[in-house]
Image (tube, grey):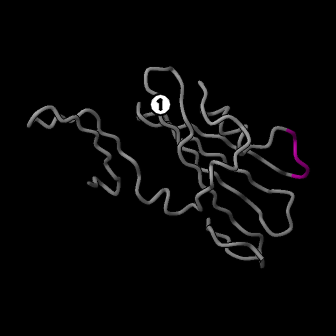
Amino acid sequence: MTKNNQAVTQTYTISGNNLTLVSECLTATNERDSYSAINLEQISSELTGSNPREMAIAAFGFQEPQEGNFQQTVTVDDRNPQQVVVTITQNNLPDDSVQDVRYRVEFEPVANQSQWRMVWAGRQQRCRQGRGSQDWTTEACL
């Protein structure tokens, strides 16, 4: 089911002949499509914890200062109680082909706990002038 370019995930319970809606969660359908999915099994940091922002930074962020005009911005969208989305944008990377990288990291609550589990992550990038796309893309820079 979709609403305004968002997918609606619905969870139901069945009791006898009755079908009861338990929860409904909106997810932007086009957001994931514009990122290359990252295999979470390759993440060495914790995938479950109490602070999605800290977990996302531990998995994909830079902990130490970088050279040049590097800048890292982290935004947290927690408007949906069934999902937290952390976006990490890294600008002016010290790389000769990749200028900027952006990660989208999605978390869902762990049942009966005040914890969150990383359930999906994706990456996109912008290339330096003459090295590929200057728009956000999943294509490799040259």
What residue is pinned by disc 1?
109
Percent position of residue 129, x then y = 77, 74
Name of the residue lying farthest toward the front:
16
Residue 56 rendering spot, x and y as whole percentages: 65, 39
Amino acid type, mark 1? Pro
Task: Judge by depth and name the residue closer to the eye, 125 or 11.
Answer: 11
Image quadrant assignment for residue 118 = top right
- Comparing 136 with 103, the one in front is 103
Numbered range of the magenta stretch:
64-68
- Write down the quadrant of residue 5 in the picture: bottom left
Q: What secondary structure is marked by label 1?
A: strand
72 sits to left or right of 2: right
Seen from the viewer's position, the closer of residues 97 and 22 is 22
User: Relative to residue 52, is residue 30 depicted above or below?
Assistant: below
In the picture provided, is 67 more to the left or to the right than 93?
right
Question: In the image, what residue occupies the spot 43% across and 20% down?
Answer: 112
Which image quarter is the C terminus in? bottom right
Q: Residue at x 74, y 45 (%)?
A: 72
In the image, taking residue 112 as reference, residue 104 lies left or right, namely right
Q: Quadrant of the N terminus?
A: bottom left
